[in-house]
Amino acid sequence: MDISHRQFNKRIQFKDRDGSALANKQIHIKQNDHSFLFGCGAFDFMPYVMNGDEEHKRLAESWLDIFNYGTLPFYWGNYEKEEGRTEKDLLMKTANYLKEHNVKVKGHPLCWHTVCADWLLKYDNETILKKQLQRIEREVTGFAGVIDMWDVINEVVIMPIFDKYDNAITRICKEKGRVGLIKEVFAKAHECNPSATLLLNDFNTSINYEILIDGCLNAGVPISAIGIQSHQHQGYWGKEKLEEVLERFETFALPIHFTENTLISGDLMPSHIVDLNDWQVDEWPTTPEGEERQAKEVEEMYRILFSHPLVEAITTWDFRDGAWLGAPSGFVRKDGSQKPSYKMLRNLVRDEWWTDTNVITDENGFATVSGFKGSYALSADGHSAKESLTDDTELVITLS
Amino acid sequence: MDISHRQFNKRIQFKDRDGSALANKQIHIKQNDHSFLFGCGAFDFMPYVMNGDEEHKRLAESWLDIFNYGTLPFYWGNYEKEEGRTEKDLLMKTANYLKEHNVKVKGHPLCWHTVCADWLLKYDNETILKKQLQRIEREVTGFAGVIDMWDVINEVVIMPIFDKYDNAITRICKEKGRVGLIKEVFAKAHECNPSATLLLNDFNTSINYEILIDGCLNAGVPISAIGIQSHQHQGYWGKEKLEEVLERFETFALPIHFTENTLISGDLMPSHIVDLNDWQVDEWPTTPEGEERQAKEVEEMYRILFSHPLVEAITTWDFRDGAWLGAPSGFVRKDGSQKPSYKMLRNLVRDEWWTDTNVITDENGFATVSGFKGSYALSADGHSAKESLTDDTELVITLS
């Protein structure tokens, strides 16, 4: 698989503080981070940041040893259980902690019919929409600079026909239509943070979602990236489906984010379950065979996605087993121990797709440097520079 | 079923040429036509208009005894078999004949991937699109005043994924996307005839079509009416599905046209056939039991559609058995004899839903008149007037 689009290859001239070329020198080229977003649900950072217990500390450390990108929960029904009393403090502290550890944070989601605030139900549709837009303004403006990436609206394909229970968002989506509501919430998010990355996110990867995106783009909705969920509790999609999905969604020429990936290491959920939330089990253990399978599937899937030029992010949903649905869906077991999938992914992210090398400059201080796109420390003889290396343009770097 | 929205009920003052009220007079209120569009495929008028043979003359007469609305074929591959040589003469003569017989005409379709012109295949996509838009300009401008209603684009849901054979329109739809192509062809049609009724038409009545329409409307596409095909060779949808479809598509608050209705009077096509065109049979006879069933289904379906306020048109696709797919899909048999469905529909259109009555004016010439919306002849003592009666506003009519 061709992954040359993930790499740079450029001539760099190295100079010292005085502007003299560093001729015939060995330079250490050390990658600090990926341009690609290797993400994971970062919900577990919240108790850690607030309480700092040992269990969550170990989790946080192993999380940070792979990932540079985390999703934090902004489900309205949890974020603002009572109208006007939000969890801003908790989320801001956690987001800042992640930011300090060079982790890019995405807020998820600003508008969704599930885990919606029940207190909205007492209002009429006009008021619900007003409060939805105010909510977007409050979060997008309030977190700007700390969180500049948002799943603006989630699962719109089923939003107006979702009928498991009454909720405020289905009500307004029924009234305004899918694209009508998407337009409103994206316009507000974009207005509040024009440089933010704004995602439309769905688990429905059928033609429905294609047509929805097509309509939105023609209606001028400022979608920065297409979000695709890939919860595979019922079994790995496989190469063929994965490539087929990529082929259909690449036609929009927008960045693609795999926003919610799940591959489990235990028994598969039966295929007749339509809404994954309907699968309630007392125990869902991880198994040795399941763990081997999961690692293989993680490897194949991440390789395929990393090789696709439009894919900019892959987020695995659960870091630890036993989170959503109690599934063995993590990279680590319930006790925090690392599964084969953890080791597999760490190897890809921090070894196979990672650059740590030396080059020797010529008599004019030039060297050709290639590596995986990302941020770097470049050093020689105790002098160093930090630089983002993401393209093939020639560059002059001063080590000071 | 409530059909009061199909009726007017108004006070009318009748006067004579001198402006005197026609007091205590009996006035004959005679409906000449329906506001509702009772339509049928009018393809058979083409050989009749060109050749005037007896067989087609009888067909034309029984057609005109029910319908006020006809669809004429503008399939690009037939209309312009060789680039630059069109069937304009044939179509114009036929459309004019229908117009002279008070039949509103719709052209079908301006853009479609099926029956497409093969000679387009030699051009690149940019040229194909240019020729498609020129084609729209030529037909919409050229027929304006005779044909002011168009199925602008047909079956877009499957258009970019249609893979039975290569064709020029699938190529450009793949490139521009569904909504992108719809925007272009509607913009051109609207520009060429701003008062024309422009339809989007599809056999796909799923959520796909809903989302497509939603996107188009939010993208500003000037859709005048939603076209829904209902070819039921595999069996009558039934009341439940029909009402469910209406319920979903009424949310756009646009007029709904049932554009291509088929109910057959013979054996049903097996349900495993996906593309109806794949069903090839040597003989597909009409049967007495089938004819009784067809008449019942026609009655139920037309009653349901007539009772829905947004439905403005129902077009049955084949007038005579043995047309598309050789199916027993007509109101008349192959020999032109009338089936029970013909009699059923004629009874609805020209009797049950038809007004032919008398009223007596009061001492000031006033009478309250009610009837089915449409055009009328009003007369007394050899004096008469023609009037369109479509609402409940009070009116003065002079019989001269």
Image (cartoon, coloured by chain):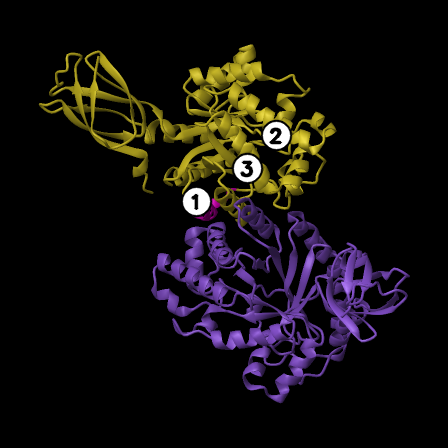
Chain colours: A purple, B yellow
| Earlier sequence position, callout 3 versus callout 1 | 3
Q: Residue at x 54, y 20 (%)?
A: B44
Region in magenta = B236-252
- Disc 1 marks which residue? B252
Q: On the same chain: label 3 and label 2?
A: yes
Mark 3, secondary structure of its residue: helix
The tag on residue B326 is: 2
Per the model, the C-alpha gap separating discs 2 and 1 is 35 Å
What is the chain identity of the residue bearing mark 2? B
What is the chain identity of the residue bearing mark 1? B
Q: Nearer the viewer, residue A107 or B327?
A: A107
Q: On the same chain: label 3 and label 1?
A: yes
- Disc 3 marks which residue? B183
Please say whether residue B248 is one of the residues in the magenta stretch: yes
Residue type (three-letter) at the residue carrying disc 3: Lys
**In the figure, B58 relative to A320: above or below?**
above
Does the image show residue A254?
A: yes
**In the figure, A361 relative to B309: above or below?**
below
Residue type (three-letter) at the residue carrying disc 1: Phe
Q: Position of residue B206 (x, y in %)?
A: 54, 47
Q: Position of residue B199 (x, y in %)?
A: 49, 34
Quadrant of the rendering where the N terminus of chain A is positioned: bottom right
Q: Residue at x 68, y 74 (%)?
A: A267
Q: Nearer the viewer, residue B373 or A220?
A: A220
Q: Position of residue B103 (x, y in %)?
A: 43, 21
**In the figure, B208 relative to A311: above or below?**
above
Mark 1, secondary structure of its residue: helix
* Label 2, residues with CA under 10 Å away: few <14, some 14-19, many ≥20: some
Q: Residue at x 73, y 78 (%)?
A: A339
